[in-house]
């Protein structure tokens, strides 16, 4: 018999006020038997129990110490046989953006219209949430604070003009096109280009239905330009990665604004963009952001998704109450106190299984998946380790971690 519980009554033959209940409970290994006695003092006059007290039976402390020593020895044997961590697939290679700088370019071309980047010029990015049926998506961009002006007419040109000809000819932007650069250095045209004056006080931009813009002499005009690029592949899976220029494009990312004036002359301005460094979660950053909850971080395991520049992770730690906590993506938590461990050991022994799938820790999204399994000693069914399995579209990690049994409350 793997386990049993028995109780029996005992009466004091001399006193009719004393009643005893003796309980024997067998759990764990074959020699693990817990025995306790409940002493009840009866009050016959009031028909109630006056006092109850639980006492340990002689020899229980010795048996408990022997059991702990045996568990420690067995735990050392099991720890020495833990499999080594397995990791397949690449890790995300972070680009050292400290060595990359955004260059400022001058406006070039024959047109008298001049373009320049304002002091608060930025290039923001966005992506479709899902790819289309032909496995393409749109990479959006918005260029802010591009200053338009008219180049002053040079004095020799004025002297050569006839008096009947106005000194300052009106000039307009007749056409605006934006190109983007790919890895081989060539330029490709962007789609759905629109332009709007810079809005005031966080108002929505008023996109112009007509691209013809009159440029008056001695005045500066600040504009915002937007557009998109059709790319093959998949967009980012979260807001952080979608707010970037896609990894299939070079860094720094270059856009060339080309305008044609009403005299068919052109000028161009190159604007550059640099993605912010990817904020990947690490053991150190996880511990720092959760330090108010963590007493001891036992394990931090991850697998990288190099296709989307994302990281999936699982963590195991002792919280401030010394409960064992498992954490997976999607804000999933699993708390274990000592009583829960004993219940799991009992169930494993009853089913004679050396591992149990912790379904609550299962996470699956966009090709990313995490699993956790409780591992039991096949001889004593002691819960001693957890196996973590993490996978992405490009990588896989498997690691078995010893749980801090004696530290769990």
Image (tube, rainbow, N blue to C red):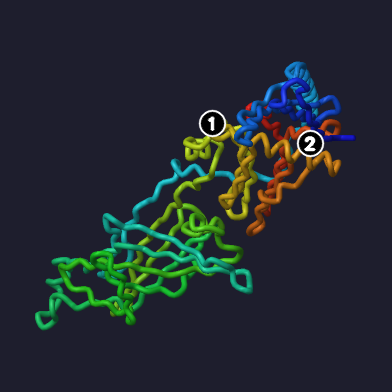
> Residue 340 location in percent, x, y?
68, 39
Viewer-closest of 283 and 22 = 22
Q: CA distance from mark 1 to mark 2?
A: 25 Å
| Marker disc for residue 72 | none
Q: Residue at x 73, y 36 (%)?
A: 342
> Residue 76 location in percent, x, y?
76, 23
> Residue 389 location in percent, x, y?
71, 45
> Residue 351 location in percent, x, y?
84, 44
Q: Secondary structure at mark 2?
A: strand
Q: Secondary structure at mark 1?
A: strand
| Marker disc for residue 376 | 2
Q: Is residue 376 left or right of residue 132?
A: right
Residue 191 position (above or below residue 241): below
| Marker disc for residue 295 | 1
Q: Residue at x 60, y 35 (%)?
A: 46
Residue 210 position (above or below residue 301): below
Viewer-closest of 218 and 378 = 378
Q: Residue at x 56, y 50 (%)?
A: 331
Can residue 211 be seen?
yes
| For the residues bearing labels 1 and 2, Cβ distance under 8 angstroms | no
Could you say which quadrant of the image residue 343 lies in?
A: top right
Viewer-closest of 138 and 168 = 138
Q: Residue at x 63, y 44 (%)?
A: 334
Q: Residues within 10 Å of mark 2 (few under 14, many from 20)?
A: many
For the image, the number of numbered tags is 2
Give whichever of discs 1 and 2 has the lower sequence position: 1
Q: Is residue 305 left or right of residue 121?
A: right
Which residue sits furthest right?
1
């Amino acid at each position: 018999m793997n386990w049993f519980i028995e109780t029996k009554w005992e009466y004091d033959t001399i006193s009719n006020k004393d009643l005893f209940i003796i309980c024997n409970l067998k759990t764990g290994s074959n020699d693990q038997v817990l025995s306790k006695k409940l002493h009840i003092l009866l009050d016959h006059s009031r028909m109630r129990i006056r006092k109850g007290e639980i006492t340990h039976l002689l020899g229980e402390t010795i048996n408990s110490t022997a059991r702990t020593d045996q568990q420690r020895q067995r735990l050392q044997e099991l720890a020495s046989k833990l499999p080594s961590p397995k990791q397949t697939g690449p890790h995300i290679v972070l680009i050292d953006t400290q060595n990359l700088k955004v260059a400022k370019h001058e406006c070039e071309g024959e047109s008298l219209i001049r373009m320049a980047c304002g002091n608060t010029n930025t290039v923001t990015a966005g992506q479709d949430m899902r790819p289309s049926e032909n496995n393409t998506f749109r990479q959006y961009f918005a260029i802010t604070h591009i200053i338009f002006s008219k180049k002053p007419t040079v004095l020799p040109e004025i002297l050569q003009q006839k008096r009947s000809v106005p000194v300052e000819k009106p000039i307009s932007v007749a056409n605006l096109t934006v190109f983007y650069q790919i890895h081989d250095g060539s330029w490709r045209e962007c789609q759905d280009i629109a332009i709007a004056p810079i809005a005031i006080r966080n108002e929505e931009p008023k996109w112009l239905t007509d691209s013809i813009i009159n440029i008056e002499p001695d005045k500066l005009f600040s504009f915002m330009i937007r557009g998109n690029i059709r790319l093959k592949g998949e967009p980012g899976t979260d807001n952080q990665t979608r707010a970037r220029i896609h990894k299939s494009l070079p860094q720094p990312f270059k856009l060339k604004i080309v305008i044609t004036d009403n005299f068919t002359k052109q000028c161009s301005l190159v604007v550059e963009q640099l993605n912010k460094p990817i904020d990947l979660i690490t053991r150190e950053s996880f511990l720092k952001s959760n330090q108010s909850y963590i007493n001891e971080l036992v394990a931090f395991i991850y697998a990288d998704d190099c296709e989307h520049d994302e990281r999936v992770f699982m963590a195991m730690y002792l919280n401030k109450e010394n409960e064992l906590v498992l954490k997976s993506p999607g804000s999933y938590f699993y708390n274990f106190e000592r009583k829960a461990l004993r219940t799991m050991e009992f169930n494993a022994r009853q089913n004679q299984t050396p591992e149990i799938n912790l379904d609550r820790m299962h996470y699956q999204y966009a090709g990313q998946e995490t699993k956790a399994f409780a591992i039991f000693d096949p001889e004593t069914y002691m819960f001693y380790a957890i196996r973590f399995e993490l996978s992405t579209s490009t990588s896989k990690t498997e690691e078995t971690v010893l749980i801090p049994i004696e530290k769990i409350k």
